[in-house]
Amino acid sequence: MKETPFWVEDHPRPQGLTSEMPAATDYLVIGSGLTGLSAAQRLAADDRTVTVIDQGEIAGGASSMNAGMVSPDVKAGVDTVYERYGPEIGTEMWASTVRSVELVRDLAKRPGIDALTHEGGMAALGKGPRRAASFERDLRWYREHFGVDWELLRGDEVARVVGGGSFDIALYEPEGFGVHPARLVFGLAGLVEQAGAVLVGDCRAISLTRDRAGTTVETSQGSINAGNVIIATNGYTTREPSRALARLIVPIGSYIIVTEPLGSEQADRIFPGGSMTYTRKRLLHYMRRTHDDRILLGGRRSLHTDLDLRDSAADLRAALIGYWPELEDVAITNVWGGKLGIPFDLTPHIGRVDDAWYAVGYAGHGVALSCQLGQELAGMLIGEEPPSVYSRIPHEGRFYYDGRHPWFLTPASYLYRALDRLGA
């Protein structure tokens, strides 16, 4: 079993994307995942000089190693946003998440990317009357407010999206789909480079200093002067270069295994339509079929980012066999982990701290939302779009978190496991 992301092994990072860092740039983007690259693409298309730096490899982190699952909505649920901020904000945010799905669908099919889009829908999976009642409430609310054409699948109908008999209820969203995340983000990096942006890897941003001429950013490769700075680090956000931003976003870990290729007959029994699926729990699992008929399963037994990969693989394999006992003798070929960015209100945000703009906080919905927020932030900066809905809601931290030691992840993990066992 390899401790490396399957997606990157299947589609290696292209060579020749990186360059030397210039002394000055109109826009400096810190972070080369989907958020930063989406922003850079739009800014470069506006004939601005754009530089993208990353503390690691270009297009690394969660953007190239996630599950590749795309659907509308935010982690908190737009119904919750509607309740907190009213119908105008809620409706505008829902519309943005719907656009985000179409944005990725279009991007994934562009020449030079071909992210292996699979139009199988998205399904939340559950079991028992309590989960059925929850799905029924969700379906009623989203139909009433947004006219969605989702379906509630019961009993034998669930086999349309997942086999094995572990689930007896599913909330199916036909607009959902799957992509190959490494192909998507590496392809986008190529488009950004072709548009004239400079990409600089292994370049850590250390500090920001603002003056009348712009912002000077000290990095591990020297200093660069920028007219505007965008921080697009999400789950990889640290106290450098902005302690203020680090207080607003909590990195948590997510871990994934994939099986060896099963062959189409067995893969058809498990995911007959190729739907993207997930369990509706606090410490959830997300599952899908890959383009080469493997089964991917991800999740976590704890919220921490530094879990042992072998232990995580054992936990995830036990879950896999619990859902599909026929896979007991199937080999696990890869295990890996990445970081999600979790805001305390479970809602994405665009904002400004330390004279830098930022877009963060996707909480597991990042494939679509990262691309959308990157585009919206860039549109704001070049004056082509009004302030984004994500910039018009408050983004607050908590007095007990300094952006460095998320001590609360351990008790939260124990609590979530207990609530999940109770079905609460």
Image: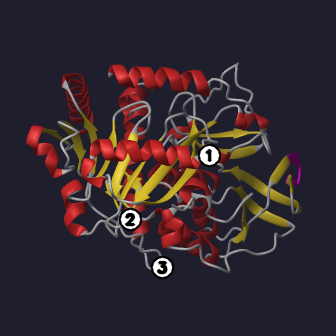
Magenta region, residue range? 208-215
Q: CA distance from mark 2 to mark 1?
A: 31 Å
Image coordinates for residue 383, horizontal then vertical, percent? 60, 54
User: In the depicted view, which residue is nearer to us: 144 or 300?
Assistant: 300
Which residue is at a point 57% across and 58% down the rendered structure image?
3
Residue 18 vertical position relative to residue 142 in the rendered view, above or below: below
Label 2, on which residue?
260
Image coordinates for residue 155, horizontal then vertical, percent? 11, 38
Say whether residue 163 is magenta.
Answer: no
Mark number, residue 112: 3
Q: CA distance from mark 2 to mark 3?
A: 27 Å
Q: Amino acid at mark 1?
A: Asn
Q: On the rendered structure, is 403 left or right of 313?
A: right
Q: Amino acid at mark 2?
A: Glu
Label 1, on which residue?
234
Q: CA distance from mark 3 to mark 1?
A: 26 Å
Q: Amino acid at mark 3?
A: Gly
Rate crowding at label 2 as few (under 14), some (14 to 19) or many (20 or more) other CA atoms within 10 Å: some
